[in-house]
Image: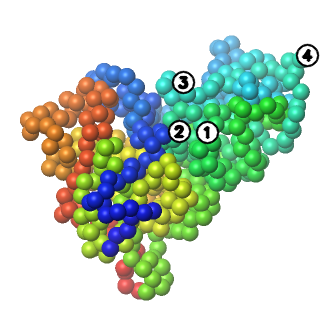
Amino acid sequence: MWLCWPSCSAPSSRSPSSGEASTGGDAIKSEDVVALVKNAAGNIETGGHGADEAAVEAAAEEKNKEEVERKPADATAADTAKPVCYETSRRSDTCEAAGDVRVVGSSQTVYVDTLERDWKTRPYCRKHDAFALSHVKEWSLKPLPSGAAPQCTSNSSATAFVLSTGGFTGNPFHDYTDVLIPAFITARPFAGEVQFLVSSYKSWWMNRYIQIFQQMSRYEVVDIDADDEVRCYRRVVVGPTFHRELGVDASKTPGGYSTADFRKMLRNAFGLERATAAPSGDRWDIRRRPRLLIISRRPSHGRAFMNERAMADMAASLGFDVRIGEPETSTDTSKFARLVNSCDVMVGVHGAGLTNMVFLPAGAVLVQVVPYGKLEWLARNTFAEPSAAMEVHYMEYAVQLDETTLSEQYPSDHPVLRDPMAIHKQGWEALKTTYLDKQNVRPHLGRLKNTFLQALKMLPHGRDD
């Protein structure tokens, strides 16, 4: 038996919804798309901005194993004092200052009496991505003027934390990788005594994630660009710190907090009951059966399962309690998080919908279906590598030539089918359009059954007491 969530007709008679929010599209964008595609295909020229790509910073960072020094982000070589703004990773700059701090949100300016010079930054974790930063407002940190200093209209003992929800927000992968996890990394040491001042504020976006911000701060979140106050603090942080895709590097955090701590915070935020993928203690409880979630997508968006109902029936025949999930922009995040947390196996084609793995209990299994076209590198950097720190078992199902709808669109001797690397060499846009946007999949049920059986063996369900 299988069920759709929250409500839908049989998969064979409907177009399944995308597994991603529509506002940001399914675009998993990397500032190092060029580098990663080159890594995969050799010498390539890319054309245009691919605002739909997966995280390749990891690939570039592997070349650069050395730890990034805390070097000035906007300073001249003559500066000898500890910089106010410094590079916290190859993806992020952070500015910190203490003293008489006055934030004037309407002009994106922070005045601090201890500063000796101006500093500028864009508080979003894609510092080298010009397209993303074109949607992020620049902030200035300036010395407090001795004469006409703006007068405080609000005072707080909390630390002010300025960050942006511009860039690629609206896409779940970027929501977590670019904003939420970096915010957690930066705010955690303040133990709630931090106030989020959000630039490029989107009310619909904040409504989706407000429970997370409430876990990180005891104070209201401020739409700082629209704020008329002169907010005064003793300390300010401008710009969150990035570590890795969908993760926290515990070796870089004070006290060693980690991805596991971030996931614990998510469970508290959304009221998720399961920390681990353990079955119910009641022998007659349906939860004795492992639950499998299929992340559904619309065929018009690409990467949809064309035999979704058959997949669900097959999984049910193996003993799974099957659910089909359709997260969209209008989906209640808390409810969908609880659905994912109730599951033991989650399967989906590569895309931002797999970001919901953050809600899976430890010991659960993620099955990423990799589209045809030599895209294993893309799958690895986005979801395979983060899974270990989440304590989630990772499995991969690579779509073969006879399982892709591309075989219905092109003749058998076409390079799209016979030589995917030739398409890679045409650049990211050609790769994206061909293998991500135009491709749907029809997994072979026999092959997929073997994958599901392997996943089942990784779970404690069904074992004799």
Question: Residue 363 location, x and y as percent?
Answer: 44, 65
Where is mark 4, residue-wise?
147
Q: CA distance from mark 4 to mark 1?
A: 35 Å
Q: Nearer the viewer, mark 1 or mark 3?
A: 1
Quick check: marks 2 and 1 in contact, CB under 8 Å?
yes
Q: Amino acid at mark 3?
A: Ser
Marks 2, 4: nearer the viewer: 2
Compare residues 258 and 22 and report the one nearer the observer: 22
Closest to the camera, between mark 4 and mark 1, is: 1
In which quadrant will I find the C terminus?
A: bottom left
Report the residue at 9% width, 37% height from top.
411
Determine which residue is flagged by label 3.
134
Note whether residue 239 is visible: no
Label 4 sits on a secondary structure element that is loop
- Front position among marks 4 and 3: 3
Name which of mark 1 and mark 3 comes first in the sequence: 3
Which of the two labelled residues, at mark 2 and mark 4, occupies the earlier sequence position? 4
